[in-house]
Image (spheres, rainbow, N blue to C red):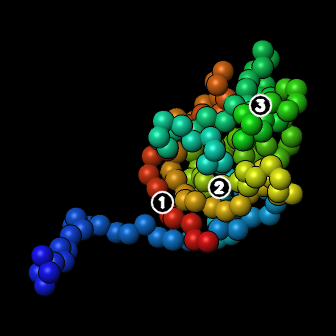
Amino acid sequence: MGGASKAMIMIKPPEGYKPTPTVKYRSRPGDWFTYSPAVRPCVHKEWLVDQGRGYVDPGYRINAKGEYEGRQFDLFTKTFTGPWRSLPKKALPFLDAIMACEPVVVTVSENDKTSPDYGRRKGYVDVWEIANPRVTDEGLCFDFLNRIEWCAE
């Protein structure tokens, strides 16, 4: 087959196609929200389920009194590291944002247990519209609808 040239095939995007924008998000260590370019709740990539179509964070529940409770849960060993207790005050705006279906920023965390940054946010993946938020026996759950933006490094 020497000398035979291969023709490049151009695929035309569908009419009305708009590429997903790329945006650089920022937050501070320990924050539950980004602060730039928009205030958005952050969720861990490690809790994506159903091939990325859903989210289940087992660190939340509703107690017998109908109050939210939280429990520290290690993202990578998948084990609880403390007892159930009332959520810290900074968790409530986060839950309010999720329950209001505000777009979320999917983050990735350091998973090397030997790293001093183990469990800390390493970067941002993308921003999604969400639906059907709820707290069940499994934890904090919602569905991903549409990707709004990719996150730049």
Image height of 103 relative to 150, above or below: above
Residue type of the residue flagged with mark 2: Thr
Label 2 crowd (10 A; few <14 / some 14-19 / many >=20)? some
Pick whichever, 137 or 112, lies toward us. Answer: 112
**Labels 2 and 1: the sequence-earlier one:** 2
User: In the shown orientation, is residue 151 left or right of residue 77?
Assistant: left
Under circle 2, the secondary element is strand
In the picture, the disc for residue 148 is 1
Residue at the location (74% across, 23% down)? 62
- Please provide percent x and percent y for residue 79: 77, 31
Residue type of the residue flagged with mark 1: Ile
Image height of 6 relative to 30, above or below: below
Residue at the location (80% across, 30% down)? 80
Q: How many marks?
A: 3
Residue at the location (83% across, 53% down)? 114
- Mark 2 vs 1: CB contact within 8 A: no
Q: If the image is split into quadrants, where does the C terminus sit? A: bottom right
Residue type of the residue flagged with mark 3: Thr
**Label 1 to label 3, Cα distance in Å?**
32 Å
User: Which residue in the structure is indicated by mark 3?
Assistant: 79
Give residue 57's quadrant in the image: top right
